[in-house]
Image (cartoon, helix red, strand yellow):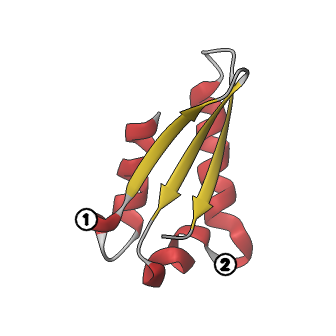
């Protein structure tokens, strides 16, 4: 799932070499922290958060088979 999020984010931004996804394991959940260049944050979040919502939806579908919830955080670099 980490690779999926990184692949999609790299194709959305103008500086794909600055995309990184860190996976953190909680007891019940997985948290994916997506970092992009400051100039590309708007591209990943999208208008009214639509792109971020779509990324979170895809992550939820992909994690459905594991039985654990997955969360996506877009964090500042």
Tag 2's secondary structure?
helix
Which residue occupies 71% across, 21% down? 27
Rendering coords of residue 14 (x, y %): 33, 77
Determine whether 54 is above or below 71 in the image.
Answer: below
Q: Residues within 10 Å of mark 1 (few under 14, many from 20)?
A: few
Is 61 or 73 nearer to us in this picture?
73
Marks 1,2: beta carbons within 8 A:
no
Mark 1 vs mark 2: in front: 1
Q: Residues within 10 Å of mark 2 (few under 14, many from 20)?
A: few
Is 14 or 54 nearer to us in this picture?
14
**Residue that sits furthest to the bottom in the current view:** 39
Give the mark count. 2
On residue 47, the disc is 2
Determine whether 34 is above or below 61 in the image.
Answer: below
Tell me which label, 1 or 2, sits earlier in the chain: 1
Q: Is residue 18 left or right of residue 64?
A: left
Which residue occupies 41% across, 75% down? 37
Rendering coords of residue 22 (x, y %): 46, 44
On residue 17, the disc is 1
Determine whether 69 is above or below 16 in the image.
Answer: above
Rendering coords of residue 36 (x, y %): 43, 68
Tag 1's secondary structure?
helix
Rendering coords of residue 43 (x, y %): 51, 75
On residue 63, the disc is none
Is 27 or 30 nearer to us in this picture?
27
**Residue that sits furthest to the left in the current view:** 17
Determine whether 64 is above or below 8 in the image.
Answer: above
Which residue occupies 67% across, 78% down? 47
| Cα–Cα span, label 1 and label 2 | 23 Å
Q: Quadrant of residue 60?
A: top right
């Amino acid at each position: 799932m980490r690779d999926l999020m990184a692949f999609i984010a790299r194709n959305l931004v103008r500086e794909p070499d600055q995309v990184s996804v860190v996976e953190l394991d909680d007891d019940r959940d997985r948290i994916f922290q997506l970092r992009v260049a400051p100039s590309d944050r708007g591209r990943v979040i999208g208008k009214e958060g639509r792109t971020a919502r779509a990324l979170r939806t895809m992550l939820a579908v992909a994690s459905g088979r594991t039985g654990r919830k997955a969360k996506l955080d877009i964090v500042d670099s």
